[in-house]
Image (cartoon, helix red, strand yellow):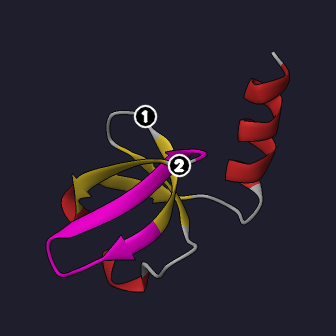
Amino acid sequence: MLSALNKGTEVVTSGGILGKVVDLDENFVKLEISDNTHIQVQRQSIESMMPKGTYKAITKKVAKD
């Protein structure tokens, strides 16, 4: 699964953080977790890939609340 990561892939980390991949290298993944908010995580911390559109739907819902 980790080898299938690309920019734009929506993922959840082992800590439960939902984000969209904006950059990656062999060791780290840069995730957008909110508008203009990014974090770097180790590739190994990516727990699962989410269906396309999940990140956008969740961030819209949070913005409304």
Give the percent coordinates (x, y) of residue 56: 75, 51
Q: Which residues are magenta?
A: 22-35
Residue 46 in which image quadrant: bottom left
Q: Residue at x 38, y 74 (%)?
A: 23
Is the stretch drawn in magenta largely helix, strand or loop? strand
What residue type is disc 2 on? Asn
> Which comes before the other along the chain, label 1 or label 2?
1
Residue 16's place in the image compared with 12, above or below, is above
Q: Where is mark 2, residue-wise? A: 36
Quarter of the picture containing the N terminus is: bottom left
Graded by Cα atoms within 10 Å as few (under 14), some (14 to 19) or many (20 or more), the crowding at tag 1 reads: few
Give the percent coordinates (x, y) of residue 38: 40, 50
Q: Residue at x 77, y 59 (%)?
A: 53
Q: How many marks?
A: 2
Residue 16, labelled with which disc? 1
Residue 40 in which image quadrant: bottom left
Report the side of 10 relative to 14 (left or right): right
- The front one of 43 and 32 is 32
User: Does dot 2 land on a helix, a strand or a loop?
Assistant: loop
Give the percent coordinates (x, y) of residue 50: 61, 58
Residue 25 part of the magenta-drawn span = yes
Report the side of 25 relative to 22 (left or right): left
Q: Residue at x 42, y 84 (%)?
A: 4
Q: Residue at x 55, y 71 (%)?
A: 9
Residue 59 in which image quadrant: top right
